[in-house]
Structures are given as structure tokens and as C-alpha cells.
Image: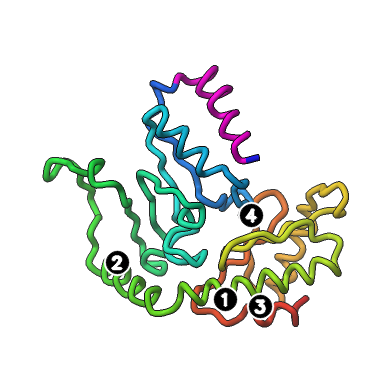
Amino acid sequence: YGETVVRYIEEQILGKVLPEKDVAGILIETIQGEGGYVLPAKGFYPALRELCDKYQILLIVDEVQSGMGRTGRWWAIENYGIEPDIVCVGKGVASGVPLGGIIAKRKLVNWTKGSHGNTFGGNPIACAAALATIDLIETGFMQNAVDIGEYALDALEEIKTRHPTIGDVRGLGLMIGVEFVQDQVTHEPDQGLRDSIIHKAFEGGLLTLGCGESSIRISPAQPTSGGKNLRRYG
């Protein structure tokens, strides 16, 4: 299925809408975030990498939500066995202290000194927070994301068997989406139910956040041990 999607991009978009010679790069969220915590189809990323190489298009991945160990790897793209040209980072890179950046192949950032600048970049407090975050991730938080994430996915799948309004449970590590539907046959999205769950959770002291048309994201802090409470809430 993933290869079919990439073939559509090549034949319908590059072939009919925008000539490949006019495309400098393809920018994509490794795992769709605001769109619903949606995982890519099997084979999608290897096929996309081949497409970009074929037409000399840069492959740029947005790891602002999925990076910094959240999926059990430094970058979610590592789960799919390909190497992008540019990685965009932010949010978790400094544990919430404002900081963003890019990681790119050396040949792409071989700029003349001073040719790339900004007004508020290089804030020492933000950079110190990023260094501390990297140290913490390297000392065990990444494995914790794997362990708690696997437990949480198993628990949520079990809860799904008892609640026909849960249409899908998906994710990697501590980046999990739970989709609410009217029934598991048609999978018609139930945004009203999703919104009411968010409000009820808030009244009970639990902050949750929606994504996509009818999903709730489960994306706790990486040192959490709270995944083992999911069956209690189910």
C-alpha cells in the first residue's frame, strides 16, 4: 500500500500537477501529528526515498512531535530504515524551553560563515536545556518509551475489545493515537464522543488533547510510569 501511495505522488502530482524539476524538497511528518497520530503505510518511506533520489529531491522529515526518543529511537524515521536529507526538530529537544533547529547532511549546510542567521537563535538557557535533555534521553528515557509504550498499546487494545466506539489504537513508543467511531463496522468518526471524553477527563483532573477528526493523543512525558494505570481507567 505504501508503494501505491508513492506511485500516485509520482504519476499524479509530479507527472501532472508540478514538474519534478520544480520540486526542491518533500517535507513530511514522519508520523502524522495533528492529523491524527497516523502511522505510514508499510513500504511508504523506502519508496519515497527512492522517488526523491530518482528526481534529486530533498527528503525533509518533521520530527518536532515524534523525535527525541519519543518512539523509542532518537528519530521516528529510524523505525523505517531510511535516511532523510534534513530533520526538523523542536518542542521536546529542550523539554519545552523554546528551541528549534535542523539536522542536515554536511553537503547541505556547507554555507559561507554568516550567511545563515537569525535574531534570537543560540539562547544559552535553551541550549543548556537541550543538552540536559539529551543526557536524560541517553540514560534510559528512550528505552522507557519503548517499554511503557508497548504496555500502553497492549492495554488500549484490550480496552478496545470492550468498547465498540474505539475504532483504532495505533502508535509507536509514547506517541499513541486512539480513534473514536460510531461503530467498528463503518468506522464513521465520532467527533462528539471524542470531545465529550476530553471534557470529562478535564473535569476529573486529566488533561488530554485531540488530534485528527476524532482521535485523542496519548503522548506523556518520556520518564512516565503511568502507562500501567491504563487498564484501571479502562
- CA gap, disc 3 to disc 1? 25 Å
Identify the residue shown where x is 59% and y is 37%.
Answer: 3
Residue 138, placed above or below residue 76: below
Q: Which residue is mark 2?
A: 126
Quadrant holding the N terminus: top right
Could you tell which of marks 3 and 1 lies nearer the N-terminus? 1
Amino acid at circle 4: Cys
What segment is highlighted magenta in the picture? 2-19
Say which residue label 3 marks: 205
Residue 29 percent coordinates (x, y) = 50, 47
Relative side of 119 to 62, left or right: left
Q: Nearer the viewer, mark 3 or mark 2?
A: 2
Residue 208 position within the rendered picture, expressed as x and y whole percent measured from the top left: 64, 67
Q: Amino acid at mark 1?
A: Asp
Q: Note whether 107 is above or below 120 in the view shown.
A: above
Question: Residue 47: x and y, percent?
Answer: 52, 38
Say which of marks 3 and 1 sits in front: 1
Is 161 part of what is drawn in magenta? no
Marks 2 and 1: which is nearer the front? 1
Tag 4 secondary structure: strand
- Circle 4 residues within 10 Å: few <14, some 14–19, many ≥20: some
Looking at the image, is mark 3 or mark 4 earlier in the sequence?
3
Q: Look at the image and tell me whether residue 40 can be seen.
A: yes
How far separated are the C-alphas under marks 3 and 4? 20 Å
Tag 4 and tag 1, C-beta contact below 8 Å: no
Q: Amino acid at mark 2?
A: Ala
Q: Which residue is mark 1?
A: 147
